[in-house]
């Protein structure tokens, strides 16, 4: 569990750095925040594409799953909440499984996230505002452990994958001249 906490701390550090940069570059309007949340759905789609592609290496799937985790945590931080979700890892989820089934579960979590965003913004005229920003953050946090479980299903330790992915994200931000 210490490895997971270390990976969480590393991811949280990156998330705060990326969020500061995004806030400065793109602003913090509700539309911008919604786009950051929608980015999670895009990343989940990329995970599904890597699983569907014949001959795809598991490394590609793991990389995309790390993107899902970092993007979901960045969306949480963008909404003014401490990024979490890696703290919800359940040891039972760390077992070999079938990725297509797990991708369906991840997609379902993403669908619940979309419903929460629609409820938060009141975009359903029949229902109005039905969700809070806290509920959106909870849905974002539900995506994170499912993505981590899928990394484990690929035969990779989620903490190792997250640490490696976070280092690459930091390199990208460094190349853009984004401050620590």
Image (spheres, rainbow, N blue to C red):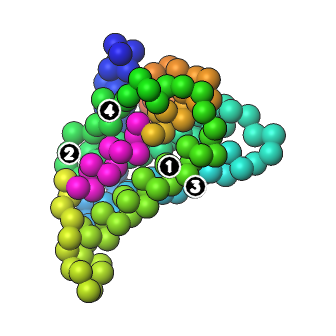
Residue holding disc 2 = 81
Query: Compared to 75, does 130 lie above or below?
Result: below
Residue holding disc 4 = 88
**Image quadrant for the C terminus?**
top left
Q: In what element is the residue under mark 1?
A: helix
Residue holding disc 1 = 105
State whether residue 101 appears in this view: yes
Q: Is residue 60 left or right of residue 122?
A: right
Q: Nearer the viewer, mark 3 or mark 4?
A: 4
Disc 2: CA contacts within 10 A as few (<14), some (14-19) or many (>=20): some
State whether residue 175 appears in this view: no
Whether tag 2 and tag 3 are in contact, CB under 8 A, the answer is no
Q: Nearer the viewer, mark 2 or mark 3?
A: 3
Whether tag 3 and tag 4 are in contact, CB under 8 A, the answer is no
Q: Nearer the viewer, mark 2 or mark 4?
A: 4
Q: Which residues are magenta?
A: 135-145
Query: CA separation, marks 4 and 1?
Result: 16 Å
Residue name at image x 75 percent, y 40 percent: 56
Q: Earlier in the sequence, mark 2 or mark 4?
A: 2
Query: CA separation, marks 2 and 3?
Result: 25 Å
Q: Earlier in the sequence, mark 1 or mark 3?
A: 3
Looking at the image, the residue that sits furthest to the front is: 92
Residue name at image x 68 percent, y 33 percent: 58
Q: Earlier in the sequence, mark 2 or mark 3?
A: 3
The quadrant holding residue 59 is top right
Front residue of 30 and 156: 156
Q: In what element is the residue under mark 4?
A: helix
Residue holding disc 3 = 45
Q: Position of residue 134 (x, y in %)?
A: 19, 53
Main secondary structure type of the part rendered in magenta: helix
Query: CA separation, marks 3 and 4?
Result: 23 Å
Query: CA separation, marks 1 and 2?
Result: 24 Å
């Amino acid at each position: 569990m210490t490895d997971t906490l270390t990976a969480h701390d590393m991811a949280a550090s990156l998330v705060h750095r990326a969020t500061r940069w995004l806030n400065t570059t793109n602003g913090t309007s509700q539309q911008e925040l919604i786009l950051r949340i929608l980015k999670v759905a895009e990343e989940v789609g990329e995970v599904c594409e890597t699983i569907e592609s014949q001959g795809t290496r598991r490394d590609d799937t793991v990389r995309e799953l790390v993107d899902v985790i970092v993007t979901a945590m960045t969306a949480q931080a963008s909404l003014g909440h401490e990024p979490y979700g890696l703290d919800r890892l359940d040891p039972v989820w760390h077992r070999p499984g079938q990725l297509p089934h797990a991708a369906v579960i991840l997609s379902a979590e993403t669908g619940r996230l979309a419903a929460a965003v629609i409820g938060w913004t009141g975009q359903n005229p029949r229902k109005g505002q039905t969700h809070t920003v806290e509920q959106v953050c909870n849905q974002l946090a539900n995506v994170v452990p499912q993505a981590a479980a899928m990394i484990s299903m690929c035969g990779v330790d989620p903490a190792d994958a997250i640490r490696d992915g976070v280092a690459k994200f930091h390199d990208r931000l460094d190349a853009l001249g984004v401050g620590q």
